[in-house]
Image (cartoon, helix red, strand yellow):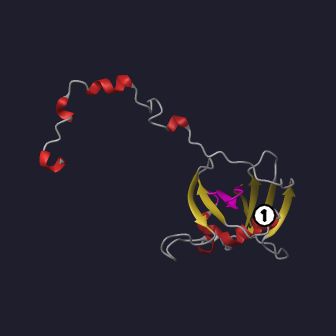
Amino acid sequence: MVYKFRVILDAEEDIFRDIAILEDDTLEDLHNAIFNAFGFDGMEVASFYTCDETWNQEDEIPLFDTGDVPGEQKIMSDYTLSDILDKENTKIIYVYDFINMWTFLVELAAVEEQSATAIYPETLFSHGEMPDEAIEKNFEADMHDDIYGEFEDDLDEDDLDMFEGDDSFEDFGFEENWN
């Protein structure tokens, strides 16, 4: 079977490529197809990230093993596309070049029969020109998730009043340990 992906650059302009690739190819093969389709040289580090239906990033699948124990971490070449993606799980995030953070939303658009005349992977359609620079990413947490957001971080004189009249803070016990 052939997986047909729409790979969308996370940018203000509509920039995407449609790529056809065999379901038994690896994530590394998809990585190669993406950087070729978008005109990158392939010399930078990249990772895929599994995600949910609303593109919330989950587990990283790197190009190279970056773990503490060599061989323990699974990498792109360890996964076939059909291991990660199917008709129910259609989305994955791709990040190329961790300095510039080129970020792509990759969605499985169709699963079709293989064409006898096609050579895979294949760029089926190209829309939009790549910008000179990636858009700047803003990595700020949402404040609504901050359980401490309603509290002040700084102490003031009123905060210190709670210790007045309580001498228990001066008696640490075991005086011989404090000499």
109 or 58, nearer to the observer: 58
Describe the element under mark 1 as helix, strand or loop.
strand
Q: Which residue is mark 1?
A: 19
Residue shown at the point (36%, 22%) measured from the top left: 158
How far from the left and from the top, in percent, is residue 42?
75, 70
**Would residue 119 appear left or right of 1 to someone viewing this image?**
right
How far from the left and from the top, in percent, is residue 66?
56, 69
- 121 in relation to 9, above or below: below
Asked which quadrant contains residue 94, the reply is: bottom right
24 or 168, nearer to the observer: 168
Residue shown at the point (35%, 26%) measured from the top left: 159
Residue shown at the point (56%, 39%) measured from the top left: 142
How far from the left and from the top, in percent, is residue 22?
72, 71
Asked which quadrant contains residue 16, the reply is: bottom right
How far from the left and from the top, in percent, is residue 86?
63, 62
**Would residue 143 appear left or right of 107 to someone viewing this image?**
left
| Magenta segment boundaries in residue numbering | 87-102
160 or 38, nearer to the observer: 160
Quarter of the image with the N terminus is bottom right
- In the image, residue 2 lies in the stretch drawn in magenta: no
